[in-house]
Amino acid sequence: MIELKNINKSYIQGPNSYHILHDINLKIEQGEFLAIMGQSGSGKSTLINIIGFLDDQFEGTYYYYDHPIHEYTRAQFSSLRNRNVGFVFQNFKLIQNVSIAENVALPLLYAGEKRAVIKERVAQVLEAVGLKGYETQLPKNLSGGQQQRVSIARAIVTRPKFLIADEPTGALDSETSKEIMALFKRLNKENNTTIIIVTHDPNVGAQADRLVHILDGRLTEDQTHRQSKGG
């Protein structure tokens, strides 16, 4: 599904150049549940920006379903991102003064879907994340765990090929974190959705089928915890 070969990334700041990623080689199969673990400043956020088609300024090759993404234009990157990737963030990024249903519907509205389709799809994903009946609630009235469920519903409503979750349990207590991880596992197993979780928490990383460590912009370990579902 995803194949990165010799990916390098540098930032220019004034007269200085900072080499962030060093010769990254990584393959991700359809249906994998992968965690990328590293401390702050390790390069993990830079790496997922490239994987998630947010950053097209890098050296090396990126093949997505055998298509040479590294040759694509910025407009093609944007189109790929909108059609293929769902994002889940640590701080939920919900619009606080509109309803849960409206928050979840946003990606479909941007995509120009018909209202009947949007209503049906929103109902489906809210039920999938355990929030059936919460359609008219406002985010500010929900717990942190419930708000993260809303953000997951919003990420999967377009039926993306893969999800990127950036520290999705970082703002949650340990019990709620377990619930959110269980939800990710269920989505991965039932829908065969490829899930890439970025974390600095070993407890979160250990729950993925595969754990990749990044340190100082280099991949240092690649561990498989359970038999990969392949693809």
Image (spheres, rainbow, N blue to C red):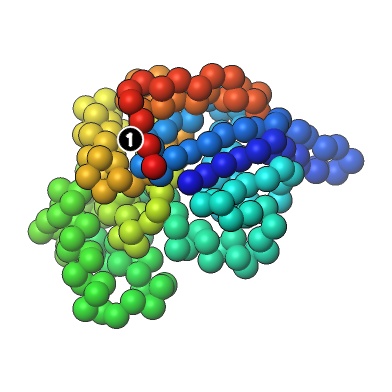
Quarter of the view holding residue 177:
top left
Q: Residues within 10 Å of mark 1 (few under 14, many from 20)?
A: some
Asked if residue 124 is positioned above or below residue 36 in the image, the reply reads below
Q: Amino acid at mark 1?
A: Lys
Residue 126 lies, in percent from the top left, at: 19, 56
Residue beneath disc 1: 229
Foreground residue among 110 and 218: 218
Horizontal arrangement in the rendering, residue 9 relative to residue 32 (left or right): right
Residue 77 location, x and y as percent? 59, 60
Q: Position of residue 127 (x, y in %)?
A: 15, 55
Q: Residue at x 48, y 38 (%)?
A: 28
Q: Is residue 166 left or right of residue 184?
A: right
| The C terminus - image quarter | top left
Give the image quarter of residue 103. bottom left
Residue 139, visible in the rendered structure: yes
Identified at 59% across, 19% down, the residue is 220
SS for dot 1: loop
Q: Nearer the viewer, residue 200 or 159?
A: 159
Q: Is residue 42 left or right of residue 203?
A: right
The picture quadrant where one finds residue 226 is: top left
Using the rendered image of the protein, determine whether residue 94 is visible from the camera's viewpoint: no
The residue at the point 21 percent across, 72 percent down is 119
Q: Residue furthest left?
A: 133
Where is residue 23 drawn, in percent x and y?
70, 31
